[in-house]
Amino acid sequence: MKPTAIPIIFCACVASFFFTGLPAAELTPDEIVQKVDDVRNPELDYTVIVSVSSYRPHNEPRIVTYDVMVKGRDRTVVKTKTPEMERGRMLLMRDKDFWAFFPEVAKPIRISFQERLTGEVANGDIARTNFSQDYSAKLLRSERIEDKDYYVLELTAKADDVTYGKAVLWVAQETNWPLKAEFYAASGRFLKTCLYENYALLAGRMRPSRLVMTDALVKNQYSVIEYEQMQTTELPEKYFTKEYLKKMD
C-alpha cells in the first residue's frame, strides 16, 4: 500500500462516520416541549387579538373577542371586547396567581385556570400556555401521519393548580410545530382535543393562528380560538397588577 493510502482511507472513514453514520443529536422530551412553547407562545412582550367561537348542537354560535397582553410567559391580561354586555371584564395572571375583574365589583376575584372561560375554552387556555414550566414530558412513541414524522409526548402536571392534569401532544419532528393535543383532568377523565391549525406569520415566526377545541363527551360541541394582529411591543410592568386593572379602558 502506498504511504498516502492510509490517510486517504482514514479521512474517508471519518467523513463517513460524521456525515452518514452518526445520527443527529436527539432532543430530550422536555427540550421538545420547550421548542413547542417557543412556537405557541413566544417569551416576549406582545399584544394579540383573540376571538373564541363556541358551537353547540341546535344553538347559534357564541362569539367572544379579547384583547390580550402578554409579558414573558408568566404575566397576562385578558380583556373582553365583545359582546358589549361583557365588555370590560378582565383576567390577570401573574405566575400561578389568577384573578378576574368585573366592572361592577370593587375587588378582583381569585379564580382557577381550570374554570371555563367560554365554550370548551378554559381560563388557562388563553391566559397561561406554558407547557414547559407546568408539565414534565415523556416520549411515548413516534408516529407517521400524512408522510410526516411526529413525536407523541405525554405531559404530566407538576402541580395541581395548572389547567390540565395531563396532556398527550403530537409534535412534528422536522419543525417542532404542534399538530394536536388531548387534554385530561387530574382524575384521568378525557376532557377535550385541540387541533393546531392555519400556521401564519405572527410576531415574526410561523405559529398556529387557529385552535379547534372539541369536547370529548358531547358530540359536535367545540370552540375555535383564532389569533390575529400579534405584535411585539414593550409592556410596562404596572399593567400586570391588580391595582392597575381599574385604570384600564
Image (spheres, helix red, strand yellow):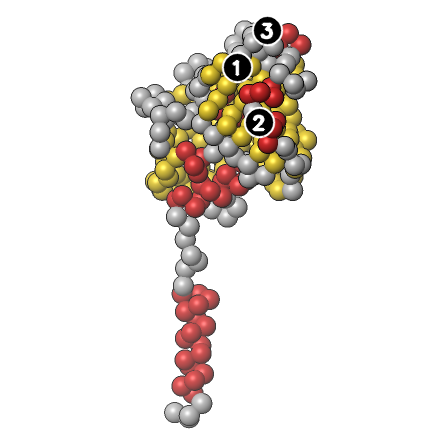
Alpha carbon of mark 2 to alpha carbon of mark 3: how far? 20 Å
Q: How far across and how far down the image is residue 40, in percent? A: 54, 36
Q: Which residue is mark 3?
A: 104
Quadrant for the C terminus in the image = top right
Alpha carbon of mark 1 to alpha carbon of mark 2: how far? 13 Å
Asked if the residue under mark 2 is in contact with the one under mark 1, i.e. CB atoms within 8 Å, the reply is: no
Q: Between residues 38 and 184, which one lies in front from this camera angle?
A: 38
Q: Which residue is mark 1?
A: 108
Q: Secondary structure at mark 2?
A: helix
**Which three-letter amino acid code belongs to the residue tagged 1?**
Pro
Asked if the residue under mark 3 is in contact with the one under mark 1, i.e. CB atoms within 8 Å, the reply is: no
Query: From this viewpoint, is residue 62 visible?
Result: no
Residue 17: quadrant of the picture: bottom left
Residue at position x 42%, y 74% in the image: 14
Alpha carbon of mark 1 to alpha carbon of mark 3: how far? 10 Å
**Which three-letter amino acid code belongs to the residue tagged 2?**
Phe
Q: Which numbered disc, 1 or 2, marks the residue that appears first in the sequence? A: 1
Q: Which residue is mark 2?
A: 240
Q: How many marks are shown on the rendered structure?
A: 3
Residue at position x 64%, y 33% in the image: 235
Query: From this viewpoint, is residue 21 visible?
Result: yes
Q: Between residues 219 and 122, which one lies in front from this camera angle?
A: 122
Q: How far across and how far down the image is residue 33, in percent? A: 44, 41
Residue 163: quadrant of the picture: top left
